[in-house]
Image (cartoon, rainbow, N blue to C red):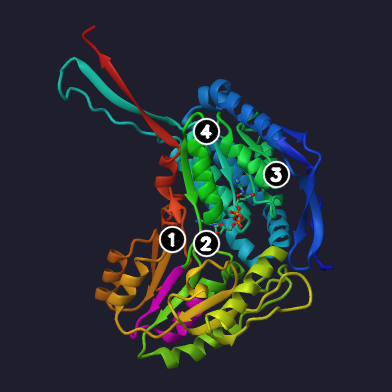
C-alpha cells in the first residue's frame, strides 16, 4: 500500500468518451490499472472492442465532415480552443500530476516538468491554428490560369499511444492535429489510460469542442488493431515498439483506402564521450540521459562510447552518479527514479540483465537487481567493457540499463558503426572540439543529435527517427504540417 492514493476522478473511468458523452463500452471485458510502485490495482477501464471503435470513428467522421469544428470554426476559434485546453491543464495540474505519477510510477518532480511541457505544447500549436498557409503559383504557363494551393486538415486521425509518457505524448499528437482542424480517436497505452481520460474531461470542460472532435477508447491489441483497420480513418499516428509498428504499417497498407501513417518506434541511442569532455558534468548527463523515466524512454542513451584516454577516469564518476540516484516513493519530491511499468517489463529487463551477465559476458559495475520488496523496482544498472555487437548493447531494453562499450580510439570508427545501428532516433556527443562535433552531427543519420546535453526536447523542434525508429515527425512545424494536405486549385479566369 502506498501512502498516496488516486484522487477522486471527476468522471467514471469505466466509461469511454465518444461524441462528447461518457458512454458505456459495448464490450464486457475490463482491465486493471496498476500502481507500479506497489503493484496494487488502482482502477479498472473497459477493454474496448471493434464496435466501440466503430462508434468512436463514426463520431469523429461526422464531426469532421458535417460538424462546426472543420466547417464553421475559423482558425482563430480553434486557436482559442487550444489555449483553453492549456488553461484547463494548468488549472488542474496538481490532479494530473498525481494521477499520472501514481499510474506510471514517475517521480512527481518529473511530472511537474511534463505538465509544464504539455501546457506549452497546446499554447505553441494554438499559434499555428490561425496560420494555415497555401501558395499562389499563377501565370506560369498561361496568363489566364490562376493556380494556387490550399492546405486542408488530413481528416480523421486515429492515435495509438505507448505507455511511457501518457500525457506528454498525447500533447505531441493531439495539439498539432487539433490546430490543423482534424478530428481524433485516441487510444492510450493499456497500462496508463487515466490521464488520457482526465484530458477528455478537461477538453469537455472548456466547452469549446463540438461533439466528436475528440474521442477516447481504452484497451489493447484488439481495439488498436480495429483502429488501424478502420476505413474511415485518414491518418494513423502510432507510438510503440518496432514489432507493433511494423504490424501497423502492414495493416494500413491492406485497408480498402490507403492512408498516411506516422510511426514513432524504438531506439538504442548512442552517446560519445570525447577526451576533452568535462567528465563530472558528462557523468551526470549520461546517467540522466539513460535512467530518466526508469530508462523507459524511446531516446534513452543506452550505448555509451568512452574514449580510451579517459575510460578509467570516467567510469568511477559514472558509477557514483548512477548509485546516487534517489529511488523512493514516486510521489515524494526527493525521488529521482521510479519503478518500471509492470510485471512484464520487470521480467523483460531482468532477463536482459541475465543476458548481459551470462551470454554477453559483460562486466556488471553496479545494480543488476531488484530494489525494494514491492512493485516493479530495478536498481540503476551499468555494464562496462561491453562488445558493441552484444545483445544488451544493440537491443532496446526499455529499463534502467546502460551499456558502456569497450573503449574507442577513433570517432570515425564510431560513426561508421553507428550508421549501421538498427535504430536512428537520437544520439549525443560530449566534447568542446567543434570539428568533432560537426563531423558527428553531419555524418550521423539520427532524428535528434544532442551536443553536451541529452533528452532536452522542445515544442518547436521536430522529433522522430530514421531506420527502425520509424518515420513521420512529432513536435515542431513539421508535425503540424503532417496533419495538413495541399489541394491544388486551377482556375481559368478567361472562362
Ligand atoms: P507496444 O508496441 O507494445 O504498444 C504500443 C501501443 O500499440 C499500445 O497502445 C498497444 O495497445 C497498441 N497495440 C498493440 N498491438 C496492436 C496492434 N496489433 N494494432 C494496433 N495497436 C496495437 O509498445 P509499448 O510497450 O506501449 O511502448 C514502448 C515502445 O514505444 C518502445 O519501443 C519505445 O521505444 C516506443 N516509443 C517510441 C517513442 C518515439 O517517439 N519514437 C516514444 C515513446 C515510446
Crowd class of label 4 (few under 14; some 14 to 19; many from 20; radius 10 Å) = some
Describe the element under mark 1 as helix, strand or loop.
loop
Tags 4 and 1 touching, CB below 8 Å: no
Q: Nearer the viewer, residue 285 or 83?
A: 285
Confirm or reject: label 1 Cβ below 8 Å from ligand 1: yes
Q: Earlier in the sequence, mark 2 or mark 4?
A: 4
The reply to whether the magenta stretch includes residue 272 is yes
Q: CA distance from mark 3 to mark 4?
A: 22 Å
Residue 74 placement (x, y as % from top left): 49, 27
Instruction: Tell me the quarter of the image containing the C terminus.
Output: top left
Q: Which mark is residue 425?
A: 1
Residue 241 placement (x, y as % from top left): 55, 56
Q: Nearer the viewer, mark 3 or mark 4?
A: 4
Q: Which residue is mark 3?
A: 218
Q: CA distance from mark 3 to mark 1?
A: 28 Å
Q: CA distance from mark 2 to mark 4?
A: 28 Å
Q: Which residue is mark 2?
A: 298
Q: Earlier in the sequence, mark 3 or mark 4?
A: 3
Q: CA distance from mark 4 to mark 1?
A: 28 Å
Q: Earlier in the sequence, mark 4 or mark 1?
A: 4
> Residue at (49%, 64%) from the top-left corner?
299
What stretch of residues is rendered in magenta? 269-287
Q: Is residue 342 visible?
A: no
The reply to whether the magenta stretch includes residue 335 is no
Confirm or reject: label 3 Cβ below 8 Å from ligand 1: no
Residue 145 placement (x, y as % from top left): 21, 17
> Residue at (61%, 65%) from the top-left corner?
110
Crowd class of label 1 (few under 14; some 14 to 19; many from 20; radius 10 Å) = many
Q: Which mark is residue 255?
A: 4
Amino acid at each position: 500500500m502506498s501512502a498516496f492514493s488516486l484522487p477522486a476522478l471527476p468522471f467514471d473511468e469505466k466509461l469511454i468518451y465518444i461524441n462528447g458523452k461518457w458512454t458505456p463500452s459495448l464490450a464486457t471485458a475490463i482491465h486493471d490499472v496498476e500502481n507500479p510502485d506497489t503493484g496494487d490495482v488502482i482502477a479498472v477501464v473497459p477493454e474496448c472492442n471493434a464496435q466501440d471503435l466503430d462508434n468512436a470513428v463514426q463520431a469523429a467522421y461526422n464531426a469532421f465532415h458535417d460538424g462546426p469544428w472543420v466547417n464553421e470554426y475559423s482558425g482563430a476559434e480553434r486557436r482559442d480552443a487550444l489555449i483553453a485546453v492549456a488553461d484547463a491543464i494548468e488549472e488542474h495540474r496538481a490532479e494530473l500530476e498525481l494521477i499520472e505519477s501514481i499510474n506510471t510510477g514517475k517521480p512527481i518532480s518529473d511530472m511537474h516538468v511534463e505538465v509544464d511541457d504539455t501546457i506549452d505544447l497546446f499554447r505553441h500549436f494554438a499559434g499555428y491554428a490561425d496560420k494555415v498557409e497555401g501558395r499562389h503559383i499563377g501565370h506560369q504557363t498561361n496568363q489566364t490560369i490562376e493556380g494556387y494551393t490550399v492546405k486542408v486538415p488530413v481528416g480523421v486521425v486515429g492515435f495509438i499511444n505507448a505507455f511511457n509518457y501518457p500525457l506528454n505524448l498525447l500533447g505531441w499528437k493531439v495539439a498539432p492535429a487539433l490546430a490543423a482542424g482534424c478530428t481524433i480517436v485516441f487510444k492510450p497505452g493499456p497500462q496508463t489510460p487515466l490521464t488520457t481520460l482526465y484530458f477528455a474531461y478537461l477538453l469537455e470542460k472548456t466547452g469549446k469542442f463540438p461533439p466528436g472532435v475528440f474521442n477516447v477508447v481504452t484497451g489493447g491489441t484488439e481495439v488498436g488493431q480495429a483502429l488501424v483497420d478502420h476505413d474511415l480513418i485518414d491518418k494513423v499516428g502510432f507510438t510503440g515498439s518496432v514489432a507493433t509498428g511494423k504490424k501497423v504499417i502492414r495493416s494500413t497498407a491492406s485497408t480498402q483506402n490507403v492512408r498516411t501513417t506516422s510511426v514513432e518506434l524504438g531506439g538504442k541511442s548512442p552517446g560519445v564521450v570525447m577526451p576533452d569532455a568535462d567528465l563530472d558534468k558528462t557523468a551526470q548527463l549520461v546517467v540522466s540521459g539513460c535512467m530518466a523515466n526508469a530508462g523507459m524512454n524511446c531516446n534513452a542513451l543506452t550505448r555509451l562510447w568512452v574514449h580510451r584516454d579517459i575510460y578509467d577516469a570516467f567510469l568511477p564518476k559514472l558509477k557514483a552518479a548512477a548509485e546516487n540516484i534517489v529511488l523512493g516513493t514516486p510521489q515524494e519530491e526527493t525521488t529521482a527514479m521510479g519503478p518500471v511499468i509492470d510485471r512484464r517489463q520487470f521480467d523483460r529487463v531482468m532477463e536482459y540483465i541475465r543476458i548481459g551477465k551470462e551470454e554477453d559476458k559483460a562486466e556488471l559495475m553496479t545494480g543488476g537487481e531488484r530494489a525494494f520488496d514491492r512493485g516493479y523496482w530495478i536498481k540503476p544498472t551499468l555494464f562496462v567493457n561491453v562488445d558493441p555487437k552484444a545483445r544488451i548493447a544493440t537491443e532496446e531494453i526499455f529499463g534502467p540499463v546502460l551499456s558502456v562499450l569497450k573503449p574507442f580510439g577513433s570517432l570515425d570508427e564510431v560513426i561508421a558503426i553507428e550508421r549501421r545501428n538498427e535504430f536512428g532516433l537520437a544520439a549525443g556527443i560530449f566534447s568542446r572540439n567543434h570539428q568533432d562535433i560537426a563531423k558527428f552531427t553531419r555524418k550521423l543519420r539520427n532524428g535528434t543529435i544532442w551536443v553536451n546535453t541529452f533528452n532536452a526536447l522542445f515544442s518547436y523542434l521536430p522529433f522522430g527517427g530514421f531506420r527502425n525508429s520509424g518515420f513521420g515527425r512529432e513536435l515542431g512545424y513539421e508535425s503540424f504540417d503532417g496533419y495538413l494536405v495541399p489541394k491544388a486549385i486551377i482556375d481559368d479566369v478567361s472562362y
